[in-house]
Image: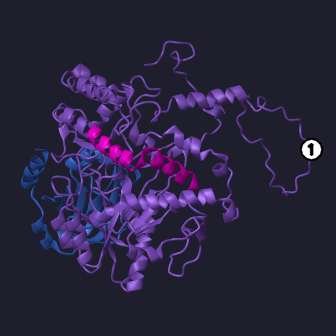
Amino acid sequence: MTKYFSREHEWIEIQDNNEALIGITSYAIEQLGDVVFIEFPSPGTEISAGKECAVIESVKAASELYAPMSGKVLEKNVALEDSPATVNKDNSVWFLKVQLSSPKEVTALMDEKTYQSYITSLET
Amino acid sequence: MKPDTFTKNAGLLLEEPLIFEKGSLNASGVDMPEPPKVDSSLGGFARKDAPELPGLSEPESVRHFTRLSQKNFGIDTGMFPLGSCTMKHNPRLNEKIARLPGFSQAHPLQPVSSVQGSLGVLWHITEWLKDLTGMAAVDLTPAAGAHGELCGLFLIKEAFKARGELKQRTTILIPDSAHGTNPATAAQCGFQIKSIPSADNGLLDVDALRAATDHTTAGLMLTNPNTCGLFERDTLEIANILHSNGAYYYCDGANFNALLGQVKPGDLGVDVMHINLHKTFSTPHGGGGPGSGPVVMIEELAPFAPLPFVKKAKDGTFSLVEENPSSLGRIKGFHGQVGMFIRALSYMLSYGIDGLTQVSSDAVLNATYIQHHLKDILGLFSTEPCMHEVLFDDGALRKDGLETLDLAKILEDEGFHPMTTYFPLVVRGAMLIEPTETESKEQLDQFINTIKYWMERTKTEEMKERFKKAPLYTPRRRFNEAATARNPKLRWYKK
C-alpha cells in the first residue's frame, strides 16, 4: 500500500474501502524526542484535513497531530495510548484508523520521494 | 561521579535524604507533654495510626532545608540565562522597602485614611506604567501574567458586548511562536484559535495575518519582542490590519525588558497589554513570592477595567474607587499583589526613567554581545538583530550527532544554569539565551568561552561520550526524562 505525506510530517496509508491509517514520520519523531502521552479523538469524531486531531506530548513539547485528510475516526490505537513510547521505536505504528470522506484530498499530499526532498530542504 | 566516601558526601556537597526518611517523632524542637486520653466524638472515624510526620530538632531541620537549598541553582547562585522571562536579579533595596512596618503591617480592610502611603504606592505605580507604555489606563489587580492575559481578553469581550458584536467575534489569532499561555487564555475565554505562521526570518508573517483577519476576528495576541528575541517591526502595519477589521491588538508583555524607556507600546498600535512586574520590574517570584500582571489599556477599553482602582483628590489624598457600572467587576480579592507594587515602584524610583532606559539598552547589548561571539559557533536562527535575548538552533550540534540537551547538561557541569531549550517550537532544537542587563562583561566572556570550549570538542567519540554522560558533577545525574514525565513520584510512601 502506498503512503502519502503531509507538510506537517504525518503519513497516511490508504487501504480498501477508503479506509486509511494515519501516523507520524521518523522526522517528526526525531523532532519530538521521547513521547510520553497521546490524546486521541474518540471513534466517531469527524476530522478535517489540515486541522488538529490529536495531541502528542513529548519530553520537549506538546504538539498537535494534523489530519492529512478528512474523514471519520473508526479506531484509535489503544496499545499506543497505553504505551506511547512505542512510537519512538517504530515509525510505522499507526495512530488512527479513519473512514475517508474526500479521497480526492490525496492529491494535496506528497509521495515518498517528494517528501524526502522536502525534508532535505528543511535540513539546509 | 559517586564520591568514594562512607557518607557519600563530597566535601561541601552533602547528600540529604527526604525529611520523611530521617529523624523520628521523638525528636522535635519542642518537648510536648503526653496528651491525656480523650474519647473521640468522630463516631468511629478517628484515625487509628499516628500520622507519619517527620521529627527533627531545630538545628536538624535548619540543616535539612539549608542543604536542600544548596542543591538549587538560582539567580543568586550564578549566571541564569533564562533571563527576565523567568527571573532577573532582585535588588535587595526593594526588599528593605517592602519590609517597612507601614507597608508590611498594613491590612487590606483598614480605613483608607490610615493606609494613604500604600494607596499612594498604587497610584504612583499606575502613573509610571501609563508613562512607560503610553496607555490611558491601568488595572493593577491581576495576580500574574496569565491572569493579566485573561483580564485583557475579558476587556476585549466587554468592548464587543458593548458594540453588539460579541457573537460575531469568534476568533483570536496567535503566532506559532507564541507562549503557550496565549492560546490557553483565548480558549478559556471561549474563542477559537487560529495559528499564524512565522516568516522564515522569525517575524510574524504579515501577509498571513492579513489573509486570516476578517469580521470574525476578535484580536491578535502577539509578544513583542517575540519569543525568538526579534522586534516585530511591522507592528504599525499589524495594528492597521487589525483595527481596519474592528479587531483588537493584544500584546504579551513578557519581553517588555527590551523596550523599557525606548518605545511605548501605545505608540506601536497596541490596544491592551499585560506587564509582568515579576519579570521586567525585578520582583521575586517562583518559590519566593507571587507574581503580578497589571494590564495597561487604551481609553476605549478603560470603562470596562476591573475594580478597585485608586483616585487622587485635589488635596493630595487617595481614595479607592470600588464601584463603576460599566466595569467588568473584580477579578482578584482586595487590591492585587500590593507587596509586588511596593517592590516594583522601589525599582522604578531607584533607577529613574533614564536608568530604566539604560536597563533595556544594557539587556540588548549583552544579548547582542553573545550573538556576536557565538554566531559562528552555534547555528544562528535568524540574521535579524536580536533584542534582549538571542536564539540559536541545534545545527552545529546535530552535525556531530549531539543535541541541545547535551550542551545544556554540560553547562550544568560548568556551574551555569542552562539556557531555555526547545522553545520556541518553531526552531529546531532551540537554545534561547537571555543574559539580562546585570551580567558583567567578565561573566558573559566566561559563559561564551565555556560554550566555545565544548563546541571545539564535539568531534571525537570520547568527547561525544562525555557530552552524553553529562552532568557528572551535579547532585543527581541525567534524568530519564520520559520516565519522570510518565511516572512521576509525587508522594512519599512508607516502605
Q: Amino acid at mark 1?
A: Lys
Q: Main secondary structure of the magenta part?
A: helix
Seen in the picture, residue B309 relative to B51 is either above or below; the reply is below
* Circle 1 crowding by C-alpha within 10 Å: few under 14, some 14–19, many from 20: few
Q: Is residue B472 above or below residue A82?
A: above
Work out whether residue B314 can be spotted.
Answer: yes
Picture colour for chain B: purple
| Residue located 45% across and 41% down the image | B484
Question: In the figure, residue B96 lies in which quadrant?
Answer: top right
Say if residue B430 shows up in the picture: no
Which of the chains is blue? A
Tell whether position B354 is magenta. Answer: yes
Quadrant the N terminus of chain B occupies: top left
Q: Is residue B456 left or right of residue B495?
A: left
Circle 1 chain: B
Image quadrant in which the C terminus of chain B is located: top right
Span shown in magenta? B338-367
Q: Return the x and y of residue B416 as percentages of the image width and height.
A: 38, 30
Q: How many marks?
A: 1
Quick check: is B466 in the magenta stretch?
no
Say left or right for B42 vs A32: right
Instruction: Find disc 1 in the rendering and name its residue.
Output: B37
The image quadrant of residue B246 is bottom left
